[in-house]
Amino acid sequence: MELTKLKIITPDGVYIDDLKVESVSVRTADGQITIYANHSPIVSTLLIGDMKYEVNGSTKYIHLHRGILQVSREQVKILTQRLYEVDERGQRLKK
C-alpha cells in the first residue's frame, strides 16, 4: 500500500511532522473526506470534530478545533488552533 505524509501544525508548533500514514479522514465544510496517497490536490476548511488516521495498521484519533486542510499528492497538511487525542468514541485521552 502506498503511503502519504501527515503534517499537523498548531500555534504551539508542529504536532505531527510528515508521519507516513495509509489514510487520513477529516470533517470538512463540504462533508467527511478520506485521503489516500496520490489524492487530488485540494484546500478546504475543517469543522470542529474528530479526525482519524491509519498508521501501521492501527487507527489513531484526534479532535480538531476547526482549521485548514491542504492536500498535495505527497502530503496531507492540517493547520488547527487546538487539538487533543481522543479514542474511537471521541473521549479525550489522558496525558
Image: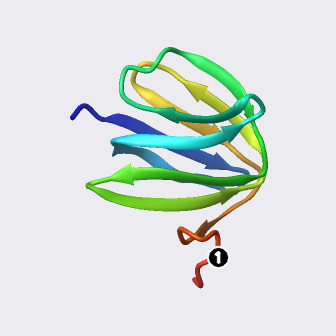
Going by the picture, which residue comes out furthest to the left?
1
- What residue lies at 70% left-to-right and 34% top-to-bottom? 31
Residue 68 in the image: state x and y as whole percent.
Answer: 71, 34
Q: Is residue 17 left or right of residue 3?
A: right
- What residue lies at 73% left-to-right and 51% top-to-bottom? 11
From the image, tell me which residue sits under label 1: 91
The answer to which image quadrant residue 28 occupies is top right
Quadrant for the N terminus in the image: top left
Q: Is residue 52 above or below residue 70?
A: below
- What residue lies at 68% left-to-right and 42% top-to-bottom? 27
Q: Is residue 2 left or right of residue 54?
A: left
Q: Is residue 36 left or right of residue 84?
A: left
- SS label for mark 1: loop
All told, the count of numbered labels is: 1
Residue 79 in the image: state x and y as whole percent.
Answer: 67, 41
Going by the picture, which residue comes out furthest to the top?
40
The answer to which image quadrant residue 47 occupies is top right
Closer to the camera in the image, 86 or 5: 86
Q: Is residue 28 above or below residue 38?
A: below
- Amino acid at the residue labelled 1: Gln
How crowded pointer 1 is (Cα within 10 Å; few <14, some 14-19, many 20+) is rated as few
Closer to the camera in the image, 48 or 8: 48
Quadrant for the C terminus in the image: bottom right
Residue 13 in the image: state x and y as whole percent.
Answer: 63, 53
